[in-house]
């Protein structure tokens, strides 16, 4: 297991992060994803920690708060030292019947962090993330509220999930202008079958020193090798019950064919190669993996031992590359001469 610097901070986190969306099974949506209870969750958390994972991600909306409860209890049951693990959770979604029990307002953030701390049985949260963009709340209100949490010691670092590049840049600008805690990470969807964030988000993350946490690295199980181009799926698979995230199937199956070729040659699973491809992307800080069984977790953990060759990476990149889109193709054309100058000067 390798450990990577988290954003512009001095914190280091494992390149794989244990996701807890499969814990709890409360509610119609979450029951389709997983319903692991305490004993099974303890087993997964323990196995991940034994493998060197020091990063665990949850959210207040997962299983209607049950995921946070199970995660916190697992840390207690396993007697995990607080400074041996980095705990991340999120705020934004609906957590009650009230009209203000949602969004990124100061009201909801300050109320929600107390409840998350109680469910997790912790005195502080290491990474508190805004789970989605709220068109009703000014970005400055959200950034100020998060800074209050950092100043009061309830939260160590703050991050964001599922925001556009311009929205994150606006928040970073406000934080810099006012001297407030800034977003240190983006949690976003990224797979070899869904590389959309490479257009705007990746250049922004690299420019501003913001870390990237990847959610659904197997595209909701599509890249696990269980699914066929003919639409067949393994019985009981997650995609069969919850077809998310949306994927361009033709491009995805072309990618799966290329992944399978590498996997067969190496004698490993398709899922391991898909995860290894992500771990080879320079912008990626940590890849969030979730599982319902220990053998699934072990298979994912094994991806850290795969070192893809340049030829393998080139083949995978070629089949999964995004189609050209403006202004990207114009940047490539107009910047060719200057890039050549940089290469010749040794600056790139």
Image: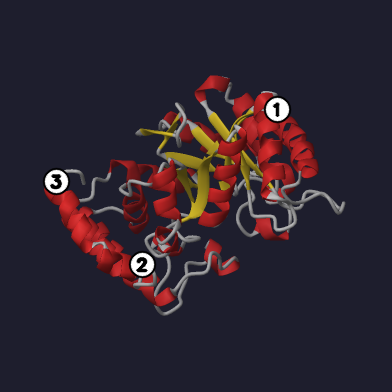
Query: x, y percentage for residue 132?
Result: 64, 53
Q: Which residue occupies the foreground of this view, 208 or 73?
A: 208
* Residue in the picture at 40% in, 65% down: 193
Secondary structure found at label 1: loop
Q: Disc 1 designates what residue?
A: 121
Q: In which quarter of the image is the N terminus?
A: top left
Q: Disc 3 designates what residue?
A: 345
Which label lies toward us, 2 or 3?
Answer: 3
Tag 2 and tag 3, C-beta contact below 8 Å: no
Q: How far apart are marks 1 and 2 (CA)?
A: 47 Å
Q: Disc 2 designates what residue?
A: 328
Which label lies toward us, 3 or 1?
Answer: 3
Residue 40 visible to the viewer: no
Left or right: residue 329 compared with residue 209: left
Which of the two labelled residues, at mark 3 and mark 1, occupies the earlier sequence position? Answer: 1
Which label lies toward us, 1 or 2?
Answer: 2
**Name of the residue lying farthest toward the bottom:** 230
Secondary structure found at label 3: helix
Left or right: residue 189 compared with residue 282: right
**Is 50 placed above or below 83 here?**
below
Q: Distance between the residues labelled 3 and 1?
A: 55 Å
Tag 1 and tag 2, C-beta contact below 8 Å: no
Secondary structure found at label 2: helix
**Is 72 placed above or below 32 here?**
above
**Is 277 placed above or below 113 here?**
below
Q: Residues within 10 Å of mark 2 (few under 14, many from 20)?
A: few
Q: Residue 47 carries which label?
A: none
Query: x, y percentage for residue 209?
Result: 43, 40
* Residue in the picture at 59% in, 65% down: 242
**Is 338 placed above or below 104 here?**
below
* Residue in the picture at 26% in, 58% down: 263
């Amino acid at each position: 297991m390798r450990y990577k610097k988290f954003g512009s901070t001095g914190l280091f986190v494992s390149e794989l992060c244990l996701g807890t969306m499969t814990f709890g099974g409360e509610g119609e949506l979450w029951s389709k994803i997983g319903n692991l209870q305490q004993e099974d969750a303890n087993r997964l958390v323990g196995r991940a920690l034994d493998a060197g994972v020091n990063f665990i991600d949850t959210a207040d909306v997962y299983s209607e708060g049950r995921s946070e409860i199970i995660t916190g209890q697992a840390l207690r049951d396993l007697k995990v030292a607080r400074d041996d693990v980095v705990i991340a959770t999120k705020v934004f979604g609906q957590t009650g019947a009230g009209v203000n029990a949602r969004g990124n307002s100061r009201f909801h953030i300050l109320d929600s962090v107390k409840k998350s701390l109680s469910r997790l049985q912790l005195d502080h949260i290491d990474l508190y993330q805004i789970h989605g963009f709220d068109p009703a709340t000014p970005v400055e209100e959200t950034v100020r509220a998060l800074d209050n949490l950092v100043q009061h010691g309830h939260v160590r670092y703050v991050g964001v999930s599922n925001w556009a590049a311009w929205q994150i840049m606006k928040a970073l600008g406000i934080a810099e202008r006012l001297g407030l805690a800034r977003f240190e990470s983006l949690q976003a969807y990224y797979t070899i079958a869904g590389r959309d964030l490479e257009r705007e988000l990746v250049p922004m993350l690299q420019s501003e020193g913001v870390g990237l946490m990847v959610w659904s690295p197997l595209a909701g199980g599509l890249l696990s090798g269980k699914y066929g181009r003919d639409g067949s799926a393994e019985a009981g698979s997650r995609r069969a019950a919850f077809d998310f995230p949306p994927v361009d199937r033709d491009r995805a199956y072309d990618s799966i064919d290329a992944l399978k070729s590498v996997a067969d040659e190496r004698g490993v699973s398709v899922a391991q190669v898909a995860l290894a491809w992500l771990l080879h992307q320079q912008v990626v800080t940590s890849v969030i993996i979730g599982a319902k069984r220990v053998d699934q977790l072990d298979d994912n953990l094994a991806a850290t031992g795969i070192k893809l060759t340049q030829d393998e990476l080139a083949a995978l990149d070629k089949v999964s590359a995004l189609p050209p889109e403006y202004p990207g193709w114009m940047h490539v054309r107009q910047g060719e001469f200057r890039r050549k100058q940089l290469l010749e000067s040794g600056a790139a």
